[in-house]
Image (cartoon, helix red, strand yellow):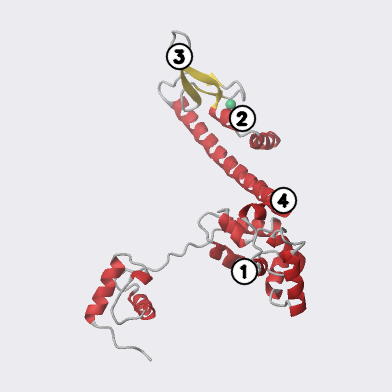
Amino acid sequence: MPGPRWTEEELTALQAQIREHRLLPAICIPGKSTAAINNQRRRQKGLNGAFQGRKLRPWTITEVKALRSFTEEYHFSAALIAQLELIPGRSRDAVSKMMFRQGFGDPGIKLRARQAYRLNSGRRRELEAFLCNEGRFASSEEISERWGIAQQTVNGYRRRLHAQLSWEQARASEHYKAKQQNVARTVGVQSCQWWQAWRARREQKLRHLRVKLQLSACPPPRRSCQTCGEEWFATKDFFYVTRKSAGHEAGKSMSRTCFLCQSERRRGECAELGKSKRAAA
Ligand SMILES: [Zn+2]
């Protein structure tokens, strides 16, 4: 049954609080429940432009592709993807929902989640015994895989049995370490890709600048990179300049290798990959 109509004063009070960007729980109108306020706020939406609701940011193709690789290739969970911010700005919920919409995800994990409730009393007692004895220090994830139940279920049992793992214990298992290594590798691959894109952009910028300088009325002296042999200009746009104060002579020294080669050297392995790619190209 609808409650009493909103009075003019109540509406004004609501709008004032919306304009202060108060969140729903902080909005107070005497005699109105949170649900009533929420409904009224929704009706007001778009009327005066004060409350716009949550902004939806559609997923980009790149994000969906990344999600596919994290879930299908690496079997990461939504929680892990969100925790490591592998898809920046997407919460666990957002990731989880998108996984569902796209049908991504480990079939084993999905099956376990569906069957999680099918633990009969005999099996339950076995699990409890296992958790208190040989499975005492096994990772919850490992147990969830072995027993075909959700990880949350395992954690729930552990809590009730007062057999939770400490932070250190949870991180000591081989299973956990292997998982972390897998994560580290993936993150490494990601940052490597990111770096390659960054480098390509930077290289393009430097080439543009070089053309601009070549066409200018009085270009600066040219300078070749000792590593790649490319001819740039002797300016701080292309080569690092360091102040040196060796002995009594104070002056500037310009690096013999260009920016690109220097950052490439710093990147170590990643650079090796990029170089071999460029050589192959
Ligand atoms: Zn170079």
Can residue 148 be seen here? The reply is no
Question: On the image, numbered disc 3 is attached to which residue?
Answer: 245
CB within 8 Å, label 1 to label 4: no
- Residue positioned 42% across, 67% down in the render: 54
For the residues labelled 2 and 3, the Cα–Cα distance comes to 25 Å
For marks 2 and 4 on the same chain, the one whose residue lies earlier in the sequence: 4
Question: On the image, numbered disc 2 is attached to which residue?
Answer: 265
Instruction: Provide residue 115's location: percent of width, then percent of height.
Output: 71, 75
- Residue positioned 57% across, 31% down in the render: 263
Q: Is mark 2 within 8 Å of ligand 1?
A: no
For marks 2 and 3 on the same chain, the one whose residue lies earlier in the sequence: 3
Question: Would you place residue 200 above or below residue 177 in this image?
Answer: above
For marks 1 and 4 on the same chain, the one whose residue lies earlier in the sequence: 1
Question: On the image, numbered disc 1 is attached to which residue?
Answer: 100
Indicate the amino acid at tag 4: Ala
Observer-nearest of 55 and 164: 164
Indicate the amino acid at tag 2: Arg
> Circle 2 sits in a helix, a strand or a loop, which is it?
helix
For marks 1 and 2 on the same chain, the one whose residue lies earlier in the sequence: 1
Question: On the image, numbered disc 4 is attached to which residue?
Answer: 178
For the residues labelled 3 and 1, the Cα–Cα distance comes to 62 Å
Indicate the amino acid at tag 3: Ser
